[in-house]
Amino acid sequence: MAKLTVQDLKKIKEDATKSIYLRGEKGNIRVIIHMGTCGIAAGAREVMTALMEEMAQNDYSHIRVMASGCMGLCSSEPNVTVEIEEQSPIVYQHVNANKMRQIFKRHVLMGEVQTDFALAKM
Amino acid sequence: MKKIRTQLMLCGGTGCHSSGSLAFREALEQEIVKRGLSEEVKIIETGCNGFCAVGPVMLVQPEGIFYQKLKPEDVPLLVEEHLLKGRPVKKLMYVEPASAQTIPKMNDIPFFSKQMFRVMRNKGVIDPEIIDEYIARDGYFGVAKALTEMTPEQIIHEVKVSGLRGRGGAGFPAGLKWEFASKSQSDIKYVLCNADEGDPGAFMDRSVLEADPHAVLEGMIIAARAINAHQGYIYCRTEYPLAIHRLTIAIRQAREYGLLGKNILGSGFDFDIEIYEGAGAFVCGEETALMRSIEGRRGMPRPRPPFPAQKGLWEKPTILNNVETLANIAQIITNGGEWYASVGTAGSKGTKVFALSGDVNNIGLVEVPMGTTLRTLIFDIGGGIPNKKKFKGVQLGGPSGGCVPEHLLDTPVDYEEIAKVGAIMGSGGVIVMDENTCMVDMARFFLDFIQDESCGKCTPCREGTRRFLEILKRICNGQGEPSDIDTLEEMAIVIKNASLCGLGQTAPNPVLSTLRYFKDEYYAHIIEKRCPAKRCVALLKFEVNPDMCTKCGACFRACPADAIIWKKKEIASIDKEKCIKCLTCFEKCKFDAIF
Ligand SMILES: Cc1cc2nc3c(=O)[nH]c(=O)nc-3n(C[C@H](O)[C@H](O)[C@H](O)COP(=O)(O)O)c2cc1C
């Protein structure tokens, strides 16, 4: 291992910060997959898998993925909520793996709400 | 590779290890693999979380959900519900004893929300065995600044401005100590870290070392730069294997990165650290004895002056600081002395870590701003006294300290204010005592410890503590005489004034402070031959008062020796042949009927 300089120290900090970002107070985008029994029965696992694959494509340390419980809208599961800082959260319904990829690329990354699948603004 | 979405911050402090976190971890790992979550969910073992009372504990991030008292049997439910379905499991969460309310998020639990984390800012946040995680939290940036942007004078100035005082007990200003050592002329100087932590009931330093070992190394490097030392030692007691393990890893990683060794960060400054394992004598925590011990000699104190800043280890100028003192240093350098001093009271700046133990609900490790009252510490953060018992007193500063009674609970945590009421801040041990504690017996306990640990070098301490203990034992055995109190008070002055080191100088404190606030208990023992708290076995009859017995049978069910004779709707009695005087029945009887 080469001896560090102050520059190297800064570089390590940058890299390592990514691996502990989940533990921080803030992340400015949250994608929540509602994984109640109903959601899982309707295919929420596949949605989660698709999302995690997208997440692995790049360094998205500002985006946090969370699994949460059923929203009470079992008939429209799988549901996914996208929360972008300072905007109202958007709930998507009947999401599948492909829709998830589209939501991720268009809404989460580019900010375009995919009104076709959106259930409501919250 | 997939991206980790959830991190499970499982406490790996000694407290949680002993309450079963390792078995839980194993079960959790297996279940995560079984459910195919190993690419999304990661277990991180952290240092002590502080809330040892409800261990093993785990924090689920990013949600911030806090789980307590985890057992391997809980694993399938936890994984199924929380990790798979995203439904936090209520029955594994913390329940506030007073309101019976379940509190899911760690930061909403009063135990955590009234604290302020500086020394413990990384606890439960980083993996202490991975240096990069420490660096991610600004680790070693204090060293970078001190070595490449500051002169030794500026470092010392910043520490002086911070107002930081030694956390090992005496509260000596850290900046001043460094200044003395920096002015001593010598090619060879040493920086030592005191991780001996000998006070019974204290575990602050252990937890800091387990949770954030690099913070202590960083403090030592900065100290070394300030006085121009090139070698450091950490004197850690052998009884702290996990702390030593993590320190060893930390030192190795720091060396690999060139943060220890020659030419640190290309600054031209050299410094290295070794661990010295102490064999666990209380007196070896005293600075001059500690240095003798590192030299390979018998750990005994010597008179001062000369002070270690002039002649310390191997007669070379040396500074010795406590673990917690050193853990504050990097933040003082990174954020400035003024930042540090913005919290606290006029004479006591920053935060202080306390180890809460004894008769208190939330046994554990807490960090509060200086100036917080003892009441907040014990009742808001500590959750008060268990089993609906009444508070009686709190012992601060371990065997060198004193007790504080109920009516002085609004005393703030401040070196001078605590000294005024007859206790000391000490290193941070807080032993809470409920109404069932006998204060004479408590003083006897500490004197027993002190007498045992007295190194024997000076007569006032060696003989004085022995005579002291004899008198206290007599009083507890019902053979006390009225003149004993005067003798105790007189001898206390001699022991305090004539002893060589802090051990003897503070030895009478537990007696003096209980005499100050609980003298009537001494008189009850001596004159009435009665122990009001019903703790001193020799003064108890082990009989049942028929007028007070409610025939409930609680004593009968609790007795481990089958010595209680009781039938439904009948008054209990005790078979003295069988009775082993364990006091269980006294504790169980809600009606004070056994005497
Ligand atoms: C009998 C005795 C035991 C001590 N034990 C410890 C100890 O375990 N840990 C500690 O940090 N200081 C202990 N001290 C205090 C040290 O002598 C010394 O004051 C302290 O380590 C200096 O560091 P600080 O200025 O950072 O507090 C003890 C003192 C005495 C008299």
Image (spheres, rainbow, N blue to C red):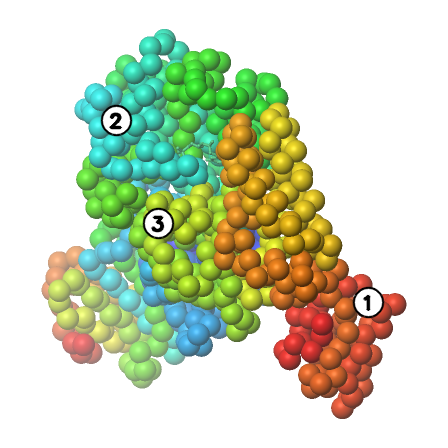
- The residues tagged by marks 1 and 3 sit, at their Cα atoms, a distance apart of 46 Å
The chain ID associated with circle 2 is B
Q: Quadrant of the C terminus of chain B?
A: bottom right
**Gap between marks 3 and 2 measured at Cα:** 27 Å
Q: Outermost residue, top direction?
A: B187
Location of residue A8 in the rendering, given as x and y in whole percent from the top left corner: 26, 28
Residue positioned most to the right = B577
Nearer to the camera, B173 or B138: B173
The amino acid sitting under disc 1 is: Cys
- Is the CB of mark 1 within 8 Å of ligand 1? no
Disc 2 designates what residue?
B156
Determine which quarter of the picture holds residue B466. top right
Q: Nearer the viewer, residue A9 or B569?
A: B569
Which residue corresponds to mark 3?
Answer: B417
Q: Is residue B366 left or right of residue B178?
A: right
Snapshot quadrant of residue A73: bottom left
- Residue at image position (27%, 70%) is A80
Closer-to-camera residue (A108/A117):
A108
User: Marks 2 and 1, Cα distance to the nearest angstrom?
Assistant: 63 Å
Identify residue for label 1: B579
